[in-house]
Image (cartoon, rainbow, N blue to C red):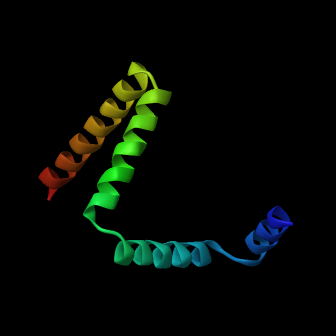
Amino acid sequence: MGRKGGEATAENHDDEFYEEIGRKGGKATAENHDKEFYEEIGRKGGKTTAENHDKEFYEENGKKGGRSRKNKRDEDDDE
């Protein structure tokens, strides 16, 4: 039953609908939780990521971040 309801919802709503409920959920979470809550979920997420990925994963992400920073600096230099 739940899956069919989710499929029907997806057929009846656009991206803006999901963006809006995401914003509302994020706002409600922020109003109901403190800094420590976010620190804890960050630690848990980091631990899970580390358990599920190898060195190459982090190397590739580091390269992507470096390229992104370089591109941003290049854009700033053009202004």
Q: Residue 36, image x and y in percent?
A: 28, 59
Percent position of residue 9, x then y: 76, 74
The x and y percentages for residue 4 are: 85, 66
Which quarter of the rendered picture does the N terminus lie within? bottom right
User: Residue 46's image quarter?
Assistant: top left
Between 41 and 16, which is closer to the camera in this rendering? 41
Res. 33 image quadrant: bottom left
Find the residue positioned furthest to the top.
55
Q: Residue 45: name its quadrant.
A: top left
Residue 30 on image: x %, y %: 36, 73
Residue visible at 49% across and 74% down in the picture: 25
Nearer to me, 34 or 72: 34
Q: In this view, does 24 lie to the left or right of 32?
A: right
At 61% across and 71% down in the image, what residue appears?
A: 15
**Which quadrant does the C terminus fall into?**
bottom left
**Against 71, is 66 above or below?**
above
Image vertical order of residue 28 relative to residue 66, above or below: below
- 37 relative to 23 in the view: left or right: left
The residue shown at (37%, 33%) is 61
Residue 79 or residue 54, whichever sits in front = 54
Residue in view at x 34 percent, y 44 percent: 43
Q: Is residue 4 above or below residue 62?
A: below
